[in-house]
Image (cartoon, rainbow, N blue to C red):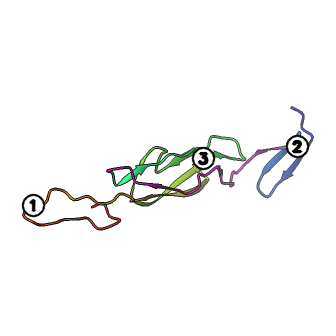
Amino acid sequence: MTFVRASIFAVVSTIVFFSSGVVMAQCSPDVTAPVISNTPADITLDNETGLCGAAATWTEPTATDACPGDVTLTSDYSSGDFFPVGTTTVTYTATDASSNTATATFTVTVNDVENPTLGPVRFGVFFANTAGQCD
């Protein structure tokens, strides 16, 4: 690898090397948060027949960091999870080797589009659920 130019920034103790137009950084201390890319767009879907929710799938985002070290990407939900009727926020958190974090969110909205049904009628009493509620 040939280094074309080096610059020293004493304020943050970072040495930055430029090679073939690509910036490679060695960071000390690392104060830069990782970057989460390709966060899914908000998802809206209808409930699954007979259920008060639906499974939602998406492509997982990715996380990178300008400084060396592993980046861990975690989420409170996974693609394929079952979501109840209503709106749920999905949060991804990226953490780099220096414990800097970044978050990205999107929502999964499940609409109740199934008409209510009546069970057997007993003693002439009717029971029905409230529109938009599964309870």
For label 2, the residue is 21
- Please identify the residue farthest to the top as the structure is shown: 1
Toward the left, the furthest residue is: 123
Foreground mark, 2 or 3, reads 3
Q: Say few, some or many: other residues with alpha carbon within 10 Å of mark 1 (under 14 / 14 to 19 / 20 or more).
A: few
> Which stretch appears magenta?
23-50
- Cα–Cα span, label 1 and label 3: 52 Å
Q: Residue at x 29, y 60 (%)?
A: 116
Confirm or deny contact between disc 2 and disc 1 (CB under 8 A): no
The amino acid sitting under disc 3 is Pro
Is the stretch drawn in magenta largely helix, strand or loop? loop
Q: Earlier in the sequence, mark 2 or mark 1?
A: 2
Q: Nearer the viewer, mark 1 or mark 3?
A: 1
Towards the viewer: 60 or 84: 84
Q: Is residue 64 left or right of residue 87?
A: right
Q: Is residue 101 left or right of residue 120?
A: right
CB-based contact (under 8 Å), mark 1 and mark 3: no
> To which residue does mark 1 refer?
122
Residue 61 bears which disc, if any?
Answer: 3
